[in-house]
Amino acid sequence: MINKVRTAAITGLEGTCVEIEGLISNGLPYFKVVGLIDATVKESRERVRGAISSSGFKFPDRKIIVSLSPGDVKKRGTHFDLPLAICILRISGQISGNLDNLDRTAFIGELSLDGSVKSASGVLAMVKVLVEAGIKRIVVPYSNRIEASLIKDAYIVPVKTLSEAIMFLEGNSNTGKYTSHISSFNTYDHENLDFSQVKGQEVAKRGICIAASGGHGIMMMGSPSCGKTMLAKRIPYILPSMAYDEILEATMVHSVAGLLKEDKPIISKRPFRRPHHSITRAGMIGGGLNPVPGEISLASKGVLFLDELPELKRDVIEALRLPLEEKYVPIFRTGRNISFPADFLLVAACNPCPCGNYTDPYRECSCSPKEISNYMRKLSGPIMERIDLHIYMEHLDYNEFTGSAGMSSTEMKEIVINAREIQKKRFRNYNITLNSQMEGSLIESFCNTDSDSNDILRIAFEKHILTPRTYQKALKISRTIADMECSSEIKSNHVMESIQYRRKLNEYD
């Protein structure tokens, strides 16, 4: 007897529908799973055997062959346990009732030896591909029910045990479609983080406001304790709330990485990732034998904060080039080309030298010129060109430190949201939403400048303050500054401010 049960496999963020075919025949007891499977699927044989026995059913003492097709797609993960168990029980005749709709149902879940259904990684990506293939009724682990329900057309059936899944198939269960509401998870715990708590540094706040408004990367340089980390931690709270498609993408990345938790089943708040400076290249951009997302993908739709940027390994820093330009990161493996999203707002920070006191007027720098040169040499020209705004943060004096608060997060968020609404309307007929994403003809169309602005840009170019790449970045930053002031035209003061953010950091010493 042959039967088919449906599930899915994932590679990166891409899913593939999988058919599990089972054949049971007379012969010595034998259980074989084929179909380009890895060790996790091979080990499922023992988990399936134990779960079936613990659930009150009998594991067949006959020859069993189970095939997972298509045979040229790698199958990995523990989520094949539940569909394998359903397939075996079906071909052995232990599941009764009207199962004509079995072909329209898919199963995802890991099994414990006691028959309980445990959570699995990548459920959201699998549900997405199954629904796109027309299989809309999907049985998933109870702990994955919320992320799975993000796919609007899916009929999600959460189960806690193998017995519950079988009862649902036989029509003997009250388990029905599960629905959740994103709004119930879309509230921010501000953790008492507000820009008004950062005394002074209004120039840096202005730069951050520009960066958040147009999606521009920003680099802050200053002596220790001048407020770089404090400012960076508060950036997610001035960004707009996440839209449905952003929640879907961010949750999918975290699901594949296995980082979703019972108390945090979806990513409805802007991610803020702060990797340690000892991180490897694979940890930053993703990879591994079975490729998983790296920090830049986990920060997608949010903020990636790289503190002490020169302390990172040079190959890690250089790996940021393509993601900063293209907003995705490719991972190449034998016969496979996997892409992870990398649409993050880069916020980098560094000291002016290893000891941090090179530009401090009150502390003596203990670094030699060679040490300072080697420290900054890790930040290559191509990388610095790809970071839109460069800001030098001055040392605070006592009056600034004890003075009144400056711009608050509420004020800054209002500016950011208004500027982004202008951009959204401007690019409604294009496949972008932010000024930083403009290329080629769009820059020519939306970054028109008057004669005074052209003269300023020409002088900056001739003095080598701007290169061909940074010239375009200056135009895009000018466009953002104009949007923040609700100006339809780019004026000379907008251009002059944008050029100030394009100066090399070592020009401030």
Image (spheres, helix red, strand yellow):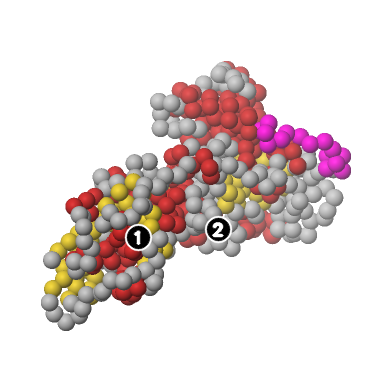
Specify the quadrant that holds the N terminus: bottom left
The kind of secondary structure the magenta stretch mainly shows is helix
The answer to which quarter of the image holds residue 288 is bottom left
Mark 2 crowdedness (10 Å alpha carbons): few <14, some 14-19, many ≥20: some
Write down the region rendered in magenta.
398-412
Q: Please name the residue shown 51% across and 48% down the image.
A: 267
Q: Is residue 432 left or right of residue 130?
A: right
| Count of marks placed on residues | 2
The answer to which quarter of the image holds residue 69 is bottom left
Residue 237 falls inside the magenta stretch = no
Q: Are marks 2 and 1 in contact (CB under 8 Å)?
A: no
Mark 1 crowdedness (10 Å alpha carbons): few <14, some 14-19, many ≥20: many
Closest to the observer, 253 or 150: 150
Q: Which dot marks residue 314?
A: 2
Q: In this view, does 418 lie above or below 370?
A: above
Residue reaching furthest bottom? 28
Specify the quadrant that holds the C terminus: top right
Residue assigned mark 1: 164
Q: Is residue 92 left or right of residue 237?
A: left
Closest to the observer, 415 or 55: 55
The answer to which quarter of the image holds residue 405 is top right
Q: Can residue 168 be seen in this view?
A: yes
Q: Which amino acid does label 2 sit on?
A: Arg
Q: Please name the residue shown 82% across and 36% down the image.
A: 404
Q: What residue type is labelled 1?
A: Glu
Residue 404 falls inside the magenta stretch = yes
